[in-house]
């Protein structure tokens, strides 16, 4: 089974293809886009698993291809590492030119890094994304946000630079550690709440296939989620409005991550708790009905995400939220649901509301 989602952005439009075995088709895709050479940018966990397949596919399609591999993990997402990759890329012989394509191979870290290098090298090279984590499949690979972290905060340096295509090979999920799967699943729940109640039905009906990594179920799951993300991105490419809906669960979630320390909680777990807190906040305002908010919590639990966390410091979390980069003129901006599939941005949440829902996560 294969699916294709078209991301309609005028001259920057591209297709996201999803299915089993697509790693072997990267060469053809690059050749179809008239590339002559390709630099595969990957990291130390993923390159040993898939870089050879990708390089072979590129060579078979007649491209001169080589790889550049950096240390896996979020701590590598820095200007320093980007600069080392650019050194290697610009030092390549014969020199790179406009027909050199960048291939991002890996999870969200490799995608953000390779995309940032593609956005800046020669003022912008074309690039293909070959995501390998569920989070990158359903979220990071579509939309053209690229960038690196800064000590002041995550993802503060970067550019919008849409890829020329995305190839999602669901077979790569076989080697993805189970605990990484939940990071992607939390973003799927987020997509359901912001745009598509039927996605929640899909999650409820397919827990077994998802946790068992069934290729057809994963293809369908990823296609639905890419379509949701694509719809949001095409309506607001540069995040001046509704693209911010994708921050649902992330205002409280990021503050939880910062408060407990990134090494002590997974992104998906923090976002899951963030969604629960933000839904309870909405419930308290008479917005999303109790039974719908509870349904979201049940889905999160069935997918293996925690729905409680003891020891959160509600006061600190509120303070962190006020300094979030999404805050505007010191006012906390938060995405709240009126129903599953219907959200809006609010800037009037109070310290008392936030503290009370964060404290409720401990029970
Ligand atoms: N650009 C965007 O729109 C966007 C959106 C969401 C998140 N992000 C970024 O994505 C990053 C998180 O992405 P992530 O969760 O994929 O992190 P990641 O890239 O670090 O991958 C998670 C872990 O899984 C490993 N891995 C990935 N694919 C594998 C596979 N198939 N087999 C075995 N191991 C595999 C990686 O080496 C890593 O250890 C963050 O930096 C975040 O800021 C970007
Ligand atoms: Zn997220």
Image (tube, rainbow, N blue to C red):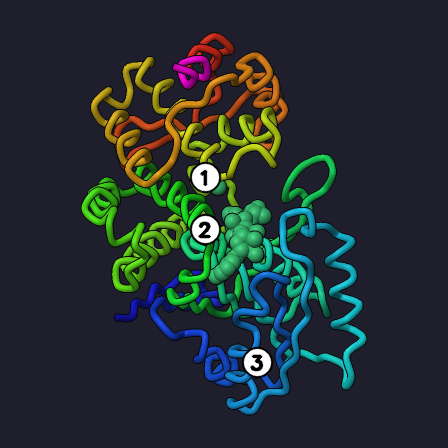
Asked if the residue at label 2 sits under 8 Å from ligand 1, the reply is yes
Asked if the residue at label 3 sits under 8 Å from ligand 1, the reply is no
Residue 276 is left or right of residue 71, and the answer is left
Residue at image point 47% right, 36% down: 247
Q: Nearer the viewer, residue 174 or 24?
A: 174
- As drawn, the residue found furthest toward the top would be 352
Cα gap from disc 2 to disc 3, whole angstroms: 24 Å
Q: Which label sits on residue 55?
A: 3
* Percent of width and height locating residue 95: 77, 81
Question: Which residue is disc 2 drawn over?
Answer: 135
Q: Earlier in the sequence, mark 2 or mark 1?
A: 2
Q: Are marks 2 and 1 in contact (CB under 8 Å)?
A: yes
Residue 233 visible to the viewer: no
Q: Are marks 2 and 3 in contact (CB under 8 Å)?
A: no
> From the viewer's perspective, is residue 353 above or below residue 307?
above
Question: Which residue is disc 1 drawn over?
Answer: 268
Q: Which residues are magenta?
A: 358-363
Q: Nearer the viewer, residue 105 or 193?
A: 105
> From the viewer's perspective, is residue 44 above or below residue 349?
below
Cα gap from disc 3 to disc 1, whole angstroms: 32 Å
Residue 91 is left or right of residue 244, and the answer is right
> From the viewer's perspective, is residue 39 above or below residue 12?
below
* Percent of width and height locating residue 224: 30, 54
Choose top left, top right, bottom left or bottom right for residue 82.
bottom right
In magenta stretch: residue 51: no
Q: Earlier in the sequence, mark 2 or mark 3?
A: 3
Asked if the residue at label 1 sits under 8 Å from ligand 2, the reply is yes
Q: Secondary structure at mark 3?
A: helix
């Amino acid at each position: 089974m294969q699916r294709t989602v078209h991301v309609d952005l005028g001259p920057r439009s591209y297709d996201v293809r999803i299915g089993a075995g697509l790693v072997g088709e990267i060469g053809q895709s690059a050749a179809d886009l008239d590339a002559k050479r390709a630099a595969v940018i990957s990291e130390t966990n993923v390159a040993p698993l898939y870089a050879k397949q990708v390089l072979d596919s590129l060579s078979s399609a007649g491209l001169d291809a080589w790889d550049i591999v950096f240390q896996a993990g979020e701590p590598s997402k820095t200007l320093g590492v980007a600069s080392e990759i650019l050194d290697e890329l610009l030092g390549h012989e014969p020199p790179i030119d406009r027909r050199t394509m960048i291939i991002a191979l890996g999870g969200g870290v490799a995608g953000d890094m390779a995309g940032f290098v593609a956005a800046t090298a020669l003022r912008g090279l074309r690039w293909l994304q070959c995501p390998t984590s569920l989070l990158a499949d359903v979220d990071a690979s579509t939309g053209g946000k690229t960038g690196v972290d800064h000590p002041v905060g995550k993802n503060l340096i970067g550019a919008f630079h849409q890829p020329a295509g995305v190839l999602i090979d669901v077979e790569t999920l076989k080697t993805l550690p189970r605990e990484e799967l939940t990071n992607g699943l939390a973003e799927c729940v987020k997509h359901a709440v912001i745009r598509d109640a039927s996605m929640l039905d899909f999650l409820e009906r397919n827990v077994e296939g998802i946790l068992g990594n069934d290729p057809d179920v994963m293809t369908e799951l990823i296609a639905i989620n890419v379509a949701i993300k694509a719809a949001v991105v095409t309506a607001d490419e540069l995040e001046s409005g509704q693209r911010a809906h994708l921050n649902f669960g992330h205002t409280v979630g990021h503050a939880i991550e910062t408060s407990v320390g990134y090494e002590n909680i997974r992104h998906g777990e923090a976002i899951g708790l963030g969604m629960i807190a933000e839904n309870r906040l909405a419930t308290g305002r008479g917005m999303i009905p109790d039974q719908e908010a509870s349904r979201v919590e049940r889905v999160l639990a069935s997918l293996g995400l925690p729905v409680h966390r003891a020891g959160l410091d509600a006061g600190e979390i509120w303070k962190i939220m006020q300094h979030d980069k999404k805050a505007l003129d010191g006012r906390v901006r938060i995405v709240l649901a009126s129903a599953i599939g219907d959200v809006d941005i609010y800037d009037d949440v109070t310290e008392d509301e936030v503290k009370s829902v964060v404290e409720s996560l401990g029970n």
